[in-house]
Structure formats: C-alpha cells, structure tokens
Amino acid sequence: MELRYKIIIFLSVMILCGCTNLNAKFDTSQPISQYMAITEIDETSEEIGLSINGYYLTLYPNKDETWIEPMSMAADAPNYFKFNAFSGYTIKVNGQEVESDGTIEVKIDGSGGLKKSVGIPIEFCNIKTEEVTRQYVRCLNQGFPEIITVNNGADDGYYYFEPTLDWIAKMNTDSEIMYYKYCEDNLYDFRPFETESGELYYGYRTPYANEDQRLLVVSSSLTECKQVIMDSNYQVIKEIYGTLDDFGKFTNTALDSHEFLLFDRDHYITLSYVPTYVYNIPQEFKSRGQFPSRVMSALIQEVKDEKVIFEWRSTDYPELYGMSVEGNKYDFSEGDWCDYIHVNSIDICPNDNNLVISMRNTDSIVEINRKTGNIEWVLGGKMDMFGLTENQKTARQHFARFTEDGTLTVFDNSTNYMVTEKSEYVGNGTGYPRIVEYKLDERELELGDFNTYEYKIPQSEIMGSATKLSNDGFIVGWGGSIKVPCKMLFSEIDFDNQKVLFEATNKTGSNMTYRVYKYQR
C-alpha cells in the first residue's frame, strides 16, 4: 500500500479510552487498553483469569461494583466465558455457577441489541470469609464509537461495517448493535459468507497480531494480513496466514487486505502481492532495458482442501504494464516497487465462472479465465474493449460486483489526481463518487445498457463499496478521503426516488470504512 494510504488509515484509527464507572465520560486521551478491565490493579490482590470470546482479562475478585470492558460480544449468539483454574471462591455468571477451569455460555437478550448501560453480573463469594463482591461485564464496550443513524423506511436487515478501522460491527436497521469486535491492528471487510452447502460463516482480515506471526512473513505485500474465519456463533475456527505451495504448505507470502472469497470452509480464493524483479516490461514504457524493474506482482490463488487448484500472477501478462495509469515508474525514478495495477476486488462472473477483477491503477475491470489465466476482456481504461464513452469509464474504481440480474456494478471513486505524466488518458475524474452499472454482452464485447447513480458529495478518494439490493436500492460504503473528509460511513439509497433510506455517521467525524454490506441475517 502506498505511503499516503498508510497515513490516512493510521490517522483514521480511533485511539479510544476507558472509564471507571457507569457514569464516567468518554475520554479519547487514554489508550484502548483502559477498556480491558477498569478495576484498579492491586499487586496484593488475588487474580482470576477470564477469556470472553477469545479475549483475555484479569479479574480481581476483592473489587466490588466495578465494570469489565469486553473486546467482543454478541446479542444474537452465545458468548463464551472461559475461566482459568481458581480456588477459594465460588463464582456465578448471570446466576450460573462456574467450575474452576470451566467455560460457560452466556446469552444476552438480543431484542434491544447490546447496550453500554447493561452489564452481565459476575458474583464472587470468598469461601473463607463469605464476603460477596459483584462485577459487571458491560455488554457494549464503553469505547465503542457512537454511531449517529437516520432511518427513513429502510427494509429490515443487518449492516456489516467498520465504524472505525479498529472495530467491526453488525447493526440492524433499528440501529441496535448485535455484534462487535475490537482489534488494535485494524480490521477489514467484515461480512457473512453463506457457503454452497448452506452453512453460515463470518470473516474479516487483519494484520498479524503478534511478533511470532509477523516473523513467518517474508514478503512485502501492500498490507500484510491474515484471513479470519468464524463460525455462526462468531467463534474463530480458522486463520489463513498466506499463500500455499504445491504441497499445501504455507509459503511465507502474506495475504493482502483487499479481497477474499469463501465458497466453503476449505474452498476459497486469496489475493497477495509479491515484490518481483521483472525483465518483460516493453521498452516504450520506460523499463530499464537489460536491467530488471521491480513491481508488485498480484498473486491470486484458488485453494480447495488445502491444495492450490488455480494460480494467476499479473507479471505473466506484460500487456498489463501498458494499461497502468498510476504506479508505473518502471525506471526506478520514484524508488518504490511499482504498484502498477492494484487489484482491489475479485468476483465470479455468473455467465462463465471466470474471475472479474477491479484493477484500480488501470481504471479498468478485467476478466481472467479461471482455467487458463488468459485475459478475456477489458472494460474501461486505456485498452477498453467495449467501446465505452469517457462518461461510461471509471477512475480509480473499487468493488466490481455482479448483481442477481447479471449486471455488473462498480463503485467509481472518480478520482484521477495521480495520473502519470506519460499518459494523456484521464478517465472520468470528476471528484464525485458514483455507482455505475453495466449490462455486458461478453461474447460480442458490446455494452447492452449503462446506468449511473450519483450522490454529489466530494469524498471517497480511496476505498468504498456499492451493492445493489433486492429492492433496486444500493447500500454504499463511502470509503475514505485524503483531501476532503468523508461525511458519512454508509448510506442505503433509493436512487429511483432520490431518497436516503438509512444513513450512518461516526459522531467523532472520522468516517472511514473499507466496505459495507447489508444482509437479511
């Protein structure tokens, strides 16, 4: 990821704080670690270890009437409280007695979602003194960002999003938080996956959480991530650390943050970037002649049952070098590895089962044959095959997705502030994000129909998503901005009637989210 992207993501991360009682005010000057447990640490106190949904806490049973801040909770699934071995106390959680080194399932009344004012009681009884103390696990962490919402008649459903890049959340159309999770290293692309066999999983990507994991990775991907897979109760069941070799072993090449597709628990598609020295750049694009140029090679793998069944590398297709409109200083004049295509989304074409890839730094969508790897067609950009007008082309687009009707929708960021000096092509480049919808005749390489949906607000220079819903409305995640702050996190819009059905903003004003989805479950 280029430096400017890293800076904006870093600046967007909310440094949140904790407080020591229910009425304490939100204080953004304190670290998020304050939320882990707000009891005062007394080195002479007895300690009891507790893990809530995989996050470890230290409890001090001699403290009374204090609040505990969990890092993850669910209102629509069990929450797992696992206690370490303890002695000298009887412990009850929500009235249920817990055994030493035992686990208990805690269900929350999900009718009103998770609330900061509601806590799950933990009762400690000292066996020797019979003294009883109580502490409360806050259902919604005090540090969770305050989201301001407006509902103007949106159909019932659930929004999946990142209120800031260190939280993920599931929220219903009544603005109730049904699930959340915190990670200090950023979280991307939280969403459900319904597999071909009908099973429900959840997933997200996050950078490596500890130094041991980081040491496994030797590549320099744009954003080195792992993919986390959770079951229908939001419990982590699998982590995918990177690409695989021919024998199904981890290759030390990390996943990239931009895309992951899950078809079944052991069948998925990953995206990675590999710094690569290449000799196959045509001389007219300022390659280094007999000397290699260095580029970020996009690597896509399809894995099934721990075996790679398809692999594609962008550097095997030299025609892509000439398509680039950004990140193409192949002569080392900028000193960085050339991010010349910048893949930011992958989808499956319903017509032929091929891969349809958004390549941001070419201003185009490209179909790749899922068996041979050959480029089947290019939509938009300098090498467009569909005869698009300039208004029909995209600029630095994201999230190319097929609809149930077979049309292709794209979130068009419409920014062209980094067009290379060599190219005269500038694309749409209005500065106003929009959604474009194409009806393609892939056999004849013709455009059957074209629609554009506009929301005239200057924002969304980076990231963003748009999904067409069953009612022909769109759920739009507004991504992030460098020059102009985003005004919203996401919007559900009925463009036919020019009506915003639902909108969410972060009260702090830091509105940045990678993608947003809406589902019925």
Image: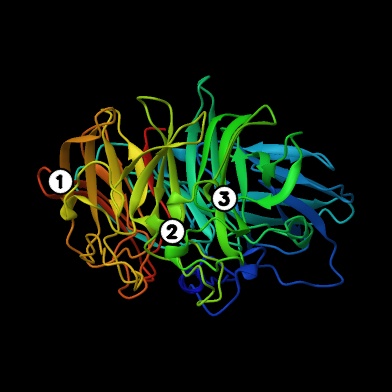
| Residue matched to label 2 | 163
Residue 486 left/right relative to 22: left
Along the line of sight, the residue nearer the viewer: 48 or 5: 5
Nearer the viewer's eye, disc 2 or disc 1? 1
Mark-to-mark CA distance, 3 and 1: 31 Å
Q: Earlier in the sequence, mark 3 or mark 2?
A: 2
Going by the numbered disc 1, the residue's amino acid type is: Phe
Residue 256 left/right relative to 80: left
Mark-to-mark CA distance, 3 and 2: 15 Å
Q: Secondary structure at mark 1?
A: loop
| Residue 280 in view here | yes
Image: 108 above or below 220: above
Image: 110 above or below 189: above
Q: Which mark, by number, is residue 205? A: 3
Q: Residue at x 67, y 57 (%)?
A: 208
Q: Which mark, by number, is residue 495? A: 1
Nearer the viewer's eye, disc 3 or disc 2? 3
Where the C terminus falls, by quadrant? top left
Q: Earlier in the sequence, mark 2 or mark 1?
A: 2
Q: Residue at x 50, y 77 (%)?
A: 333
Q: Earlier in the sequence, mark 3 or mark 1?
A: 3
